[in-house]
Amino acid sequence: MASSGEHSGHEKHSPLDQFEINPLVNFEVGGVDLAFTNSSVSMVITVLFITLFLTLTVNPRSIVPSRMQLISELCYNFIAQLLNDTVGDQGKRYFPFVFSIFMFVLIGNMVGMIPYQFTFTSHIIVTFALATVVFIGVTILGFVNHGIRFFTFFYIPGVPFYMHPLLIPIEVISYLSRPISLSVRLFANMLAGHTLLKVFAGFVVSMPFFTGVLPLTFIVALTGLEILIAFLQAYVFAILTCLYINDAYHLH
């Protein structure tokens, strides 16, 4: 049986330690723990960065846009085109919502790539909360647009009548599982990527210099891959949100 000292030492170097939530300011309201944690700090940094970036880079008076302004306009046009392609003209009114989610997930993923910063998108409670907001909002939108006819979304046209008792429950389960699949996809990708980086970093430190070059090479490659995944996961989250909005308008 390992001693407590050995056990604590093992935990200290665990690749999963980077995902531990540590309270920085403790306080409770009505018995509810509302501590300000390292995850909260990363979220605040993300929101502040997005706000400052979009505020400072957009200069309507400039004739020739700067590089930063081109990046912000590229993000704007990217989401605008995404909504137009998936939803159509009705999607323009939901641009602020989809753009906010895309930027929050994207910058949150990128902030997590900075050393000693916390990756809040690697926690299922955060990604599930975002996915639940999308799911509830789209469901309400569906009932607002179609009323009780929204339930026909689970009815598959062109299928023999005797198959509906089997297919309708499957469609309902598939619809209810949307926030789960949406949140787990983002959470699992960020968790796995950061864990691999920490594992290979441990190899670099523990191995001799010449043999440590190989895991260091893997770290460089994985870092580039993680940056790509950070963007792809924000894109997937945004495009699935657009597709769900489209379903709320066009049942079948």
Image: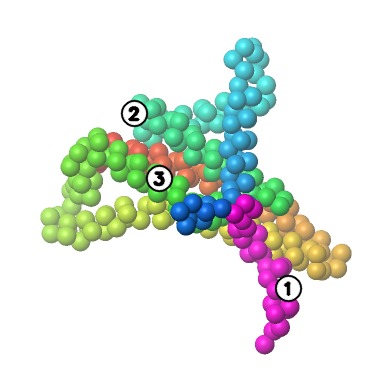
Q: Amino acid at mark 1?
A: Gly
Q: Quadrant of residue 9?
A: bottom right
- Give the residue drawn at x 49%, y 34%: 99
Question: Distance from label 1 to label 3 (Cα)?
Answer: 40 Å
N-term-proximal mark, 1 vs 2:
1
- Classify mark 1: helix, strand or loop: helix
Where residue 78 appears, x then y in whole percent?
Answer: 51, 31
- Circle 2 residue: 90
| Res 180 label | none
- Give the residue drawn at x 40%, y 38%: 242
> Dot 1, how many residues are within 10 Å of its Cα: few (below 14), some (14-19), or many (20+)?
few
Please name the colour scheme applied to the rendered image.
Answer: rainbow
Q: Nearer the viewer, mark 1 or mark 2?
A: 1
Q: Quadrant of residue 7?
A: bottom right
N-term-proximal mark, 1 vs 3:
1
Where residue 111 appears, x then y in whole percent?
Answer: 64, 45
Given residues 62 and 158, the one toward you in this image is 62
Asked if labels 3 and 2 touch by Cβ distance under 8 angstroms, the answer is no
Given residues 221 and 50, the one toward you in this image is 50
- Classify mark 2: helix, strand or loop: helix
- Residue range (magenta): 1-26
Q: Is residue 18 visible?
A: yes
> In this picture, is 60 found above or below 155?
above
Q: Amino acid at mark 3?
A: Val
- Circle 3 residue: 133
Quadrant including the N terminus: bottom right
Q: Nearer the viewer, mark 2 or mark 3?
A: 3
Residue farthest toward the bottom in the current orientation of the protein: 1
Q: Amino acid at mark 2?
A: Gln
> Dot 3, how many residues are within 10 Å of its Cα: few (below 14), some (14-19), or many (20+)?
few
- Circle 1 residue: 9
Question: Distance from label 1 to label 2 (Cα)?
Answer: 56 Å
